[in-house]
Image (tube, grey):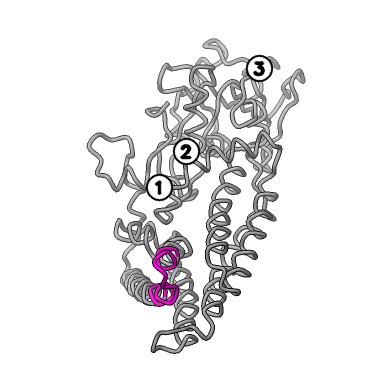
Amino acid sequence: MTMNVHLVGDCDLRLWGLTPRQRLERLLSGFPEARLIDAGQPLPSAGEVLLLRADYVYDQRVIRGLLKQSGVAMQDPRDGTIVAARDDAGRWRGVPRLDATALDGLPVVLPETVAAGLQAELRKFDRPWVAPVRADNLRKLEKALFSGAYKGVTDFITRCVWPTPARWATHLCIRLGLSPNAVTAGSYVFAILAGWWFWHGAYGAGLLAAWLMTFLDTVDGKLARVTITSSKFGDILDHALDLIHPPFWYIAWGIGLGAAWPASLPLWDVLWVIIGGYIAGRLCEGAFKIAAPFSIFIWRPFDSVNRLVTARRNPNLLMLTGAWMAGHGDTGLLLVAAWTALSTAVLLVRALWAIALSKTGHELQPWLSSVDPHAPGNPPLVRLFAPGTGPADL
């Protein structure tokens, strides 16, 4: 069913290059059921209408919830300001208003009530939120939106090292007018250069290109989310690169060593362990979906911690970098092989255990789904994996 949406008010301040109205327009364009009524156009005489204040920024889950919920007024929990309302068009008699008279009789709800049930669906476990856009909170809002661009759990470099420089780089991309796909294209260039230099034994240049590639791989996704310019093509472009390039880097690294390979184990045996373990690990992650519709890495705290260090590109790249700096490129490849084998064994055990539990009637749930990130006394794990971007932070 089509839902008529009207934006009330305006604001000239910009968050990540967009006014609040522009953000809402882009956000609403992602919902086929939402029909945006142009400014100045009267409300329809029949059907339901959703009014949204255009000087606020909204969590995507809140918009999705409002498009599903009928006959409600939603307030900002900090000061009680009504920021959205949905009801039959006749309530407003053609004039979009969010005042007490127009909203009389409507049940008042909070953002987290509206978005209830959408946490796990979007792989986000912080509290759903809305916030006014003001000159004194722009920086905090931009940080909150950037923090909210991180989905699920990831390795410790992406989580703990890249965020601040990636936020600066995202600002630079916006000022330069670069699209997320342009940044992804840069990732492809550096991924190819890294492989080429590894192949020819130029490990210093190759490692520099590889780390730049991993950094841009963080920036492109964050740029797409904070500017609401994600696309299916961009998602495929990004994930295809993430999935394909790591094995080729390891092969190129080994070939770069060439006749200088000093280890007693044959080079290609080591490479097959890495490649086979990489593929098997991905298959284990897919097999977990037989037991539960969410990622294996958010099942239990152990799995989230495991994702920080499991044998994926960034942890492996760190081992290769350390070994190269110590003058032992062969040791780096041996470490990657050993860590890949161990990581894959852990994933296999976790996936089989989850499948066995599901077969006995256990309903698996992600551990963060029952956690309030804003509750006092949260352990460090909660603060690390569910930092939150809700009202308490703004």
Return the residue at label 3.
96
Q: Are there few (<14), some (14-19), or many (20+) residues within 10 Å of tag 2? A: many
Q: Amino acid at mark 1?
A: Cys
Percent position (x, y) of residue 38? 75, 25
Q: What residue is disc 1 on?
A: 160
Give, as a three-letter code, the residue at label 2: Ala
Instruction: Choose the circle earlier in sequence order: 3 or 1.
Output: 3
Residue visible at 43% across and 62% down in the picture: 318
Q: Residue at x 32, y 46 (%)?
A: 370
Q: Which residues are magenta?
A: 321-336
Q: Is residue 106 above or below residue 176?
A: above
Residue 42: quarter of image: top right
Q: Secondary structure at mark 3?
A: loop
Q: Is residue 291 visible?
A: no
* 28 to 217, vertically: above or below: above
The quarter in which the N terminus is drawn is: top right
Left or right of 120? Residue 372 is: left
Q: Is residue 284 visible?
A: yes
Name the disc covering residue 115, or none. Answer: 2
Dominant secondary structure of the residues highlighted in magenta in the image: helix
